[in-house]
Amino acid sequence: MYAYVLEVLEIMKEEGIHDQQLVEADVLINVMESFDFILTLHLMIDILGITNELSQAL
């Protein structure tokens, strides 16, 4: 799903009608490709996995 979101943002960046769309798409791409964002996603997957296991046990 992550790859699809990046793909849509790339399309918006290339084919955007308004200048603001181009800038916003570029900023979102940079943020999503940053180390902090990737690390946060990875940690969320781990935490949600543990939470799911605990929820199933209860």
Image: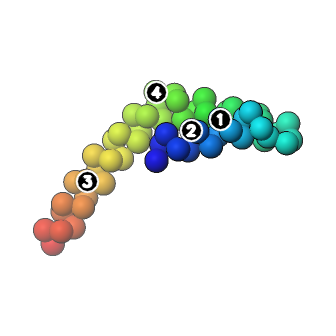
The residues tagged by marks 3 and 4 sit, at their Cα atoms, a distance apart of 21 Å
The residues tagged by marks 4 and 1 sit, at their Cα atoms, a distance apart of 19 Å
Q: Which residue is mark 2?
A: 6
Q: Are marks 2 and 1 in contact (CB under 8 Å)?
A: yes
Q: Which residue is mark 4?
A: 35
Count up the numbered dots. 4
Viewer-proximal residue among 4 and 30: 4
Q: State left or right for residue 34 relative to residue 45.
A: right
Amino acid under disc 3: Gly
> Residue 6, position in %: x, y?
56, 38
- Sequence order check, earlier mark of 3 and 4: 4
Depth check, mark 3 against mark 1: the one in front is 1
> Residue 50, position in %: x, y?
22, 54
Q: Which residue is mark 1?
A: 10
Q: Which residue is mark 3?
A: 49
The residues tagged by marks 3 and 1 sit, at their Cα atoms, a distance apart of 30 Å
Residue at the far bottom: name it: 58
Residue 55 placement: quadrant: bottom left
Amino acid under disc 1: Glu
- Sequence order check, earlier mark of 3 and 1: 1
> Residue 36, position in %: x, y?
46, 31
Residue at the spot 46% in from the left edge and 27% down from the top edge: 35
Residue at the spot 60% in from the left edge and 29% down from the top edge: 30
Please tell me how crowded label 1 is: few (under 14), some (14-19), or many (20+) other residues with Cα within 10 Å: some
Please tell me how crowded label 3 is: few (under 14), some (14-19), or many (20+) other residues with Cα within 10 Å: few
Q: Are marks 4 and 1 in contact (CB under 8 Å)?
A: no
SS assignment at label 2: helix
| Residue 24 visible to an observer of this rendering | no
